[in-house]
């Protein structure tokens, strides 16, 4: 098994080297820029959108509230990408990767807005009365391109086991083993049991858990980051300067050609930015389509706030914490592995109870809650993608999928870190390509809806009025 995983990891690494080269960076960032300009910088509405996110459209069509849809989407995005993903970007791409991760998120607000709008615009009500939507429906109904819709759904199904499951369970098991000496198979068994207890209740059960878990875990983690910044306060500004200068560095990277350093920073920064906020992947629109909302633009605005919280706030905090940690004279450097870097960083919190470092406990709790919530959110995405693929056999497929995601939670906890991260990156890229094509092709529809509801001040209007 180890030989097979090693060979598979080499293949995945080679594929990612191609997929995450300049073409993918140009397509992703280019789409972010294109939509930002064409939609007249929707980032300026983010605080208004935050206000909308806590309001209910009780009589509107949908399965869950706008806030429930948002926190379920946040549960899937705020995961290990915000902690170990950012650390991986720093280790592999240098401090400059943090800048490109942040830029990807800032510009990605426009893309997440566009995805949410199309999800509601082209959603359908299934025979069971539940809403179904997402890029596969927008591609089929808006672009009239069934084969591309099927490809997106298939890639989403695969990604739910990569970014959504194996990466997350691996992060939990690695942290549990390093911090508490718990064997991976016990962690995997416990996690699989917890996942099983939630996923069989469907979207409403997942949403209820996420409503309780997401605000707690985000506040808890931010407090830990602010504590660390207070510890290394002298190195906050030097860390920011280092991030900015390394983002545009043209030095040779470990013997490579001049300019390879900026390529590495952009590659890992953009890849980890996408992994973290998922803007451009088309995942969050799947749950956005279930929201109770009176028109597509209201939910689009609410959806866009997830990128703000995920990348502009949490990932930025993580990046500054990690880089300032490596600059401080504490013996920690960025040449170590990503999981050890984060562990040592949080280990600097100067408080221990019964000889147990509080910082490491905070990190462990953050990784568990982030990763567990991500598995729940992505299990919904994967299930909806499979329902689209299976059609009238979707009911049977749904239960088979739930069993597979539970098994994946166990398997990911016991596999090598490099393999699961490379699999996650590959699945992300394969999902993003058809979704980004859809956003560009249907950008005229997005602009038309935005003009009618947002620019002409009709946000309170019901769709179809």
Image (cartoon, helix red, strand yellow):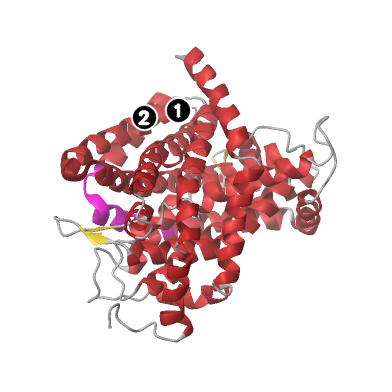
Q: Position of residue 134 (x, y in %)?
A: 35, 56
Q: Position of residue 87 (x, y in %)?
A: 63, 42
* Residue at 54% from the left image edge and 32% from the top image edge: 422
Q: Position of residue 181 (x, y in %)?
A: 49, 27
* Residue at 24% from the left image edge and 63% from the top image edge: 63
Residue sitting nearer the eye, 220 or 167 = 167
Residue sitting nearer the eye, 201 or 184 = 201
The answer to whether 221 appears left or right of 55 in the picture is right
The answer to whether 265 appears left or right of 282 in the picture is right
Residue denoted by label 1 = 182
* Residue at 29% from the left image edge and 61% from the top image edge: 123
Q: Main secondary structure of the magenta part?
A: helix
Q: Is residue 443 above or below residue 152?
A: below
The answer to whether 196 appears left or right of 77 in the picture is left
Please say whether residue 352 is visible from this viewpoint.
Answer: no
Q: Secondary structure at mark 2?
A: helix
CA gap between label 1 and label 2 equals: 14 Å
- Circle on res. 401: none
Q: Residue furthest front?
A: 144
Mark 1, other Cα within 10 Å: few <14 / some 14–19 / many ≥20: some
Residue sitting nearer the eye, 228 or 249 = 249
Image quadrant assignment for residue 225? bottom right
Q: Mark 2 or mark 1, which is nearer the start of the sequence?
A: 1
Q: Residue furthest bottom?
A: 457
- Which of pointers 1 and 2 indicates the residue nearer the eye? 2
Residue sitting nearer the eye, 92 or 454 = 454
Magenta-colored span:
197-214
Residue denoted by label 2 = 410
């Amino acid at each position: 098994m180890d030989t097979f995983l090693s060979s598979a990891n080499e293949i995945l690494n080679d594929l990612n080297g191609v997929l995450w080269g300049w073409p993918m960076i140009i397509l992703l960032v280019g789409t972010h820029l294109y939509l930002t300009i064409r939609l007249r910088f929707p980032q300026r509405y983010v605080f208004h959108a935050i206000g909308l996110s806590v309001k209910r459209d009780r009589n509107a069509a949908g399965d869950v509230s706008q806030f429930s849809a948002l926190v379920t989407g946040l549960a899937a995005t705020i995961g290990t990408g915000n902690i170990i993903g950012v650390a991986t970007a720093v280790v592999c791409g240098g401090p400059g990767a943090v800048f490109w991760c942040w830029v990807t998120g800032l510009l990605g607000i426009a893309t997440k807005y566009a995805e949410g709008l199309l999800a509601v615009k082209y959603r359908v009500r299934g025979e069971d009365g539940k809403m179904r939507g997402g890029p596969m429906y927008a591609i089929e109904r808006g672009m009239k391109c069934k084969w591309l819709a099927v490809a997106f759904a298939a890639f989403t199904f695969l990604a739910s086991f990569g970014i959504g499951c194996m990466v997350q369970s691996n992060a939990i098991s690695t942290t549990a083993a390093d911090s508490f000496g718990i064997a991976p198979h016990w962690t995997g068994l416990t996690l699989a049991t917890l996942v099983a207890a939630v996923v069989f209740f469907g979207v409403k059960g997942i949403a209820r858990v996420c409503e309780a878990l997401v605000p707690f875990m985000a506040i808890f983690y931010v407090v830990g980051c602010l504590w660390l910044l207070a510890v290394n306060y002298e190195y906050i500004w030097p860390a920011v300067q280092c991030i900015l200068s390394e983002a545009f560095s043209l030095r040779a990277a470990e013997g490579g050609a001049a300019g390879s350093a900026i390529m590495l920073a952009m590659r890992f920064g953009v890849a980890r930015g996408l992994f973290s906020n998922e803007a451009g992947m088309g995942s969050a629109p799947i749950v956005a389509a279930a929201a109770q909302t009176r028109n597509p633009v209201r939910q689009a605005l609410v959806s866009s706030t997830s990128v703000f919280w995920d990348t502009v706030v949490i990932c930025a905090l993580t990046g500054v914490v990690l880089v300032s940690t490596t600059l401080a004279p504490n013996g920690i450097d960025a040449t170590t592995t990503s999981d050890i870097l984060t562990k040592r960083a949080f280990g600097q919190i100067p408080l221990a109870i019964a000889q147990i470092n509080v910082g490491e406990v905070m990190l462990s709790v953050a990784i568990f809650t982030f990763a567990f919530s991500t598995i729940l959110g992505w299990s919904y995405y994967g299930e909806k993608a499979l329902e689209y693929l299976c059609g009238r056999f979707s009911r049977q497929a749904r239960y088979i999928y739930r069993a597979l995601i539970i098994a994946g939670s166990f398997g990911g906890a016991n596999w090598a870190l490099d393999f699961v991260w490379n699999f996650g990156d590959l699945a992300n890229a394969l999902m993003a390509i058809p979704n980004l094509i859809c956003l560009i092709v249907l950008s005229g529809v997005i602009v038309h809806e935005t003009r009618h509801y947002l620019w002409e001040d009709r946000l309170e209007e019901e769709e179809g009025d």
